[in-house]
Amino acid sequence: MTDVTPTMPADHRELTSDLAGIVCDYPYVDPEDSLSSLAHDAMEVMERVDTPEGRRERAGYTVLLHATCWYVAARLFSRSVYTSYTKALEGFRATLDPASCTCPEGSHPKDEDPEYSVGVGVSLLTEAGRAEFVEDYGIDDGKLAVYDCEGFLADLADQAAAHIREAYEANFGDVDVSHLDAQYVLDGGGIDVVAMQEAIRRSYTNNQGPVGLWSARRWLSGQVRDEDRLGLFLTLWMCVNQAYAGLPPAYARDMAAAVDTVGLDVSCGHSRHPWSTAEKSVESRYRAVLHLYAPEDHPDTLVPADLASRDLWECPVQYAELARSAKKDLEGWREMRGGDEGDWEA
Ligand SMILES: [Zn+2]
Ligand SMILES: [Zn+2]
C-alpha cells in the first residue's frame, strides 16, 4: 500500500465540470452534445455490466443520468436525447435487482443536490475516482457503497425514466387545448380577443403556450370571422414574441404552421403600419389590441389616429412583417433548445 491516492482521469475531471455547469443551468459546453454523449457512453456500459468495471460504471452513469434528466426535460427539445436517455435508463434498470438491497431502512441518499450528484456520479465511474472521492470528502468506504446498491440505483433509474417519459409527452406529444373553446369562442362563433389578451398579459402566468397553440389551431381551421382575423393573428404573434425561453415543439409546430400561411411576397404604398407604433412593450401591444376590439372600455392606445384605420391594420404587408418576425423567433427557439428539423415539424 502507498499513501498516494490514484487520480481520476483528466477527461473525467472535464466531464464533472461540464455537467456541473449544465445542472446549475449555466452550461459552457453545448448541453445537447454533452448529454447525448453521456447517454451513449452509458449505453455502451450495458455490454460489460457483468464485470466489476461495468458495475462501477453502471452506478456512476445511473447517478449522472438521474442528476441531469431535469435539464433534458426542461431545456432540450431534441427527441434523440430523450430516446437515448430512455434506452440507457431502461437498459440499466433491467439489470438491477432491487430485492438484493440490504441497506438499513432510510439509508439511501435522497434529494441530493444535482451538482453534488454530478461529482459523485463521475467519481463512481472509476476506482481512482472513488478513491479520490473518499479522500476529498473524508467519508468512509461504506458511505460510498450505498451508491452501488441495486435497490438505490433501480429507484434512481425508475425516477429518471419516468421524468423523461412525462417530459417527452409534454414537449412532443399532442397537447389538447380544446377546453379553451369554452373561454374564447363567443355565442355566435366570434372570438373573444379581449379574454385571450387578458390571459397572456402577465408573462408569469405562462399562458403563451396554450393560448398560442389555440390561436394557431383556430387560424388553421379557418373558423375565423373576418373581423377577428387581425386580433387572432396579433395574439398568436404576441404569444410567440413573449415566450422568451422558447416553447417546445408540441406548441411550436402548429404555431409555425399558422405563421407559414401568411404570404410574404406582398407590397403596398403605405409608409408605416400601426403595429410599428404599438409593439414597443407588452403593455402597449395589449392596449393597442384591446383598443381595436373594445374601444369604449379601452380608449388608450399608442397607435396615432392617422395610423388607426382598419385597412392599414389589415394591410398584407403588416401581416408579412409580423410573420417574418415570428418565424425568426421560432427559429431562435430551435437554435436555443436543439433538436433536428423533424423534431419541430408538424
Ligand atoms: Zn439499498
Ligand atoms: Zn401597407
Image: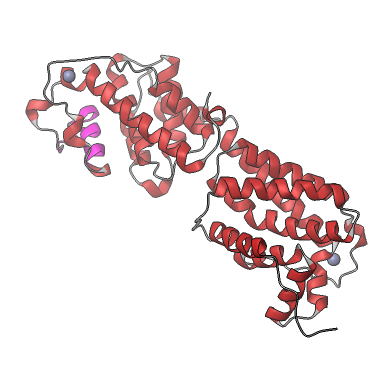
Front-lying residue, 202 or 267: 267
Dividing the picture into quadrants, the one containing residue 54 is bottom right
Magenta highlight on residue 289:
yes
Quick check: can you spot residue 253? yes
Q: Position of residue 35 (x, y in %)?
A: 62, 49
**Foreground pick, 39 / 320:** 39
Q: Is residue 11 left or right of residue 287?
A: right
Ligand 2's quadrant: top left
Residue 110, horizontal then vertical, whole percent: 71, 66
Q: Is residue 15 above or below residue 288?
A: below
Residue that appears at 23% across and 19% down: 317
Residue 161 visible, this orientation: no
> As rendered, which of 54 and 262 lies closer to the eye?
54
Q: Quadrant of the N terminus?
A: bottom right
Name which residue lies at 44% across and 27% down.
255
**Residue at 62% over, 36% down:** 79
Q: What range is drawn magenta here?
A: 284-300
